[in-house]
Image (tube, grey):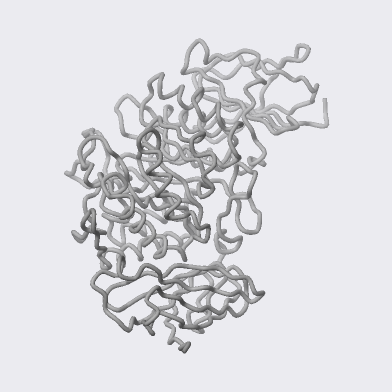
Amino acid sequence: MRTEALIICAVLAFAGTSHAEKSGDIPLWGRFEAAFTSAKAYDNPLYDVRRFEAVFTSPSGRSAKRAGFWDGGVSWKVRFMPDEIGTWKYTTSCSDDDNSGLHDVSGSFECVPNTSSHDIFSRGRIERPKGEFHLVHADGTPFFWFADTAWNGPLRSTDDEWALYLDNRADKGFNVIQFVTTQWRGGDRDENGRDAFEGSGYITVDTEYFRRLDNKIDVINDRGLVAAPVLLWALQRGAGRHLSPGYHLPHEEAILLAKYMVARYGGHHVVWLLGGDGDFLGEYEQRWKTIGRGVFGSGDHPGLVTLHPCGRSWYGDAYRDEDWLDIIGYQSSHSTSQGTVEFITKGPATNDWANIPPRPLINLEPLYENIRDEATVRDVRNACWWSILATPVAGITYGANGVWSWLREGETILNHRHNPQTKIWRASLDFPGVRETAFLASFMRSFPWWNLMPAPDLLADQPGDKDYRRFVSVAATFDKSLVIAYIPDETTVTLYNTRGMNYRARWFDPAANSWSSADITTAGNRMVAESPAGKDIVLVLEESANP
């Protein structure tokens, strides 16, 4: 017989939604949480209860299935993000159908308008439109990915530190925070000395660890930011390999652990980084395809999915038919060498994007600021601008060496090359590079960036063929009404104008966030510009009605 559940609803303190907290109503694109008391205690719920889920029915009759999760003792929960205003109903199902506390339990809640000004609540969750190279909100508004790598942040920060960090990033225009959810190569436990899980061939999870992590992810969304958790760090080289669950767990346990976290955070605004720093090709390719299909293959999971590979690794073509993969993420690594630069400017992403099923392509880890003494803020700008224009424009991730590691005074980074010049996390928050990458994001958002595609054929001559450090990246809209060229050093740039268009030409200084007019010399179907001396610069050509 179906039982009516006593539902405990939890609502985040979203801006402008205090009325929902008082009434128990859930704001649109907010998070509904239902708590259940199991009629049985299990030795290890991960294995003993293979399925606990709820099917939610919207006011208009649509249905969505969401997995629930164990939260310690006999406590179980289901979290869900409503996308329609009105009365939602749900019914649970459990693999142990004799458990009256978990199986065939029904309930309902009311979804009300969301008054928050944050885009993830006013425009809706992040989605990938089929056949496109960019992300959008649920209402169709393009979403430019601007992320920060805070890998260790949720593990090591205090609540006050985390709030300070997120306020800083939100103020600078970031909209995604990348972080690691379990103990890993760079952080072997959380601030309280707890691990997310124990074991390998047989694992147990620490619900106290995850309850602490809940609060950190709640606050990410509360600031209007998308959470991008790495579920399974997977580095298989060097020290700390045993701290990479994506590498050392059997694939069945890796799937089990990842599915637990997907269930736990599926009610949040998330993009899942299934694997982190892993090698997803060769002998590991089938393993990761098996894990991806095991966690996300049913297609009823919330949130988008990507992979974060090791440095200068490319898996795009090999995973072309993996439907669970929404974003092709890559990592260009942390060097200014010719090999690293040309991986961005001439590498597989630039060659493959047009030949694989359309997905957003994003450099999830370019050159970190303050990671090498020889790497300048200009090098950081170079890496980000080259990456943005190397493929159809979708977004970029920034990183500071002291922030990702959450480095404090007197510490060194765990299992990582030590640079004594690395600043602590708090001193790294306002580096020049983070400010200038924010300028980049703001610049892109001022144009119809989602229509920009790589256009190297517009260059009559590529300076980067003679000196890799002078590579000029060019992107344009299909009709060439907008052309953007990033010029990393003083040079003469010659562009084709085969359509005979009239352009307004301007220079954008990516370090100063300033504009100036540009003089263009026209000769036949060619346009010639002399870039300013001593700086990197962006040339912007916009169609003009005036000759």
Residue 32 point in image, percent of width and height: 48, 73
Residue 513 point in image, percent of width and height: 54, 36
Q: Is residue 136 above or below residue 512?
A: below
Describe residue 85's horizontal placement relative to residue 191 as left or right: right
Residue beneath the point at 67% across and 30% down: 476
381 or 531: nearer the viewer: 381
Describe residue 498's horizontal placement relative to residue 281 as left or right: right
Residue beneath the point at 55% across and 26% down: 351
297 or 61: nearer the viewer: 297
98 or 210: nearer the viewer: 98
In terms of image quadrants, where is residue 218?
Answer: bottom left
Residue 215 point in image, percent of width and height: 35, 65
Q: Is residue 235 above or below residue 544?
A: below
Number of numbered labels in the structure image? 0
Residue 490 point in image, percent of width and height: 53, 16
- Residue located farthest toward the left when viewing the structure as drawn: 410
128 or 190: nearer the viewer: 128
Residue beneath the point at 46% across and 18% down: 469
Q: Is residue 219 above or below residue 278?
A: below
Residue beneath the point at 42% across and 80% down: 103
Image quarter hosting the C terminus: top right
In terms of image quadrants, where is residue 459?
Answer: top right
